[in-house]
Amino acid sequence: MSWWYEVTAEGAEVVRGDLVASGRHVPLQLGRRLPSAAHALLFLPLVEVSRRNPGRCELFQWLATMETSAWLRQHDLAQLRADGYGVRLEDGRCLRFLVHVDRGVVGDAITEHERRTSGLGGLLTGYRRTDRVVPVGAVLMIAQDAEREEQLLADLVRRPLRNPVATTTRKSLYRHWPDEQVWQIAGENDRRRLIEVGASPHRARTPRPPPTSSTRPGRVAWCVESASPRCLATPTLAA
């Protein structure tokens, strides 16, 4: 059983007081900067997968949303907006990726079609406005649900991007670890594992060592640690 912890404003103040009292540095964004959906769905689970499989895989690098924007500007890609950037190492292979999280319906959707497609175009617009190849092995898209993922894939079949794109859903990432075979490439029948999404089809199907655990028992715990027993955090049971 694993738990998530959402730190309350009161809890952040307790942590701040403990840090000041002990003469330690107080982070500027303590209690102000909430983790993004990409943190919860991808970053934290990948960190846990690395912890469970030491020496075989690692989330070598992760940039949060603001740092990802700075990284994109450095590569003259300021028109892109991504929720995170990462570098995944596994069994001698490396995957650099950008991740986008579908936030669901944008505005007032009236028809069923609008509910399935509203806001999805914005995930791909920036890539279609640039002639540059984004310097990553894959672009990851996490759809709100299966219907919206289906719409994304249909759009990518009609108008593919220059970079490989892999999709999945929030539900899939709640049920499985993100390194597993949950990523769909437009036009393919079978889903791929994360490390395979940037590979050509004939290289993607490589044998994998037995995982530490075949099922995902819950989400990795995330909490601001404090020496004080008064750390006021609201726990949420993992799905």
Image (spheres, rainbow, N blue to C red):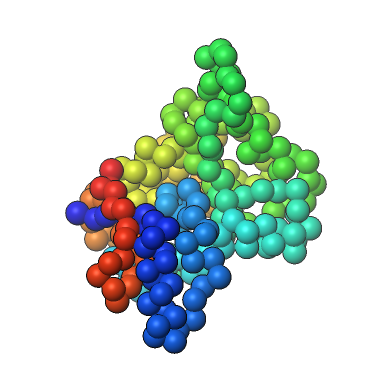
In this picture, is 165 found above or below 63?
A: above
Residue at the top extreme, as displayed: 111
Residue toward you, 54 or 40 = 40
Tell me the residue at 67%/57% (across/down). Answer: 69
Tell me the residue at 68%/62% (across/down). Answer: 71
In the rendered image, which quarter contains the N terminus? Answer: bottom left
Whether residue 221 is visible: yes
Q: Position of residue 182 (x, y in %)?
A: 40, 43
Q: Position of residue 40 (x, y in %)?
A: 42, 52
In the rendered image, which quarter contains the C terminus? Answer: top left
Q: Position of residue 89 (x, y in %)?
A: 46, 66
Apparent side of residue 130 relative to residue 88 in the rendered image (left or right): right
Q: Which quarter of the figure has residue 126?
A: top right
Apparent side of residue 175 relative to residue 122 in the rendered image (left or right): left
Number of labels in the image equals 0
Whether residue 138 is visible: no
Apparent side of residue 84 relative to residue 222 in the rendered image (left or right): right
Tell me the residue at 49%/81% (across/down). Answer: 25
Tell me the residue at 46%/39% (across/down). Answer: 168
Residue at the bottom extreme, as displayed: 23
Q: Position of residue 133 (x, y in %)?
A: 72, 52
Residue toward you, 195 or 127 = 127
Residue toward you, 47 or 56 = 47
In this picture, is 126 found above or below 62?
A: above
Q: Which quarter of the figure has residue 152?
A: top right
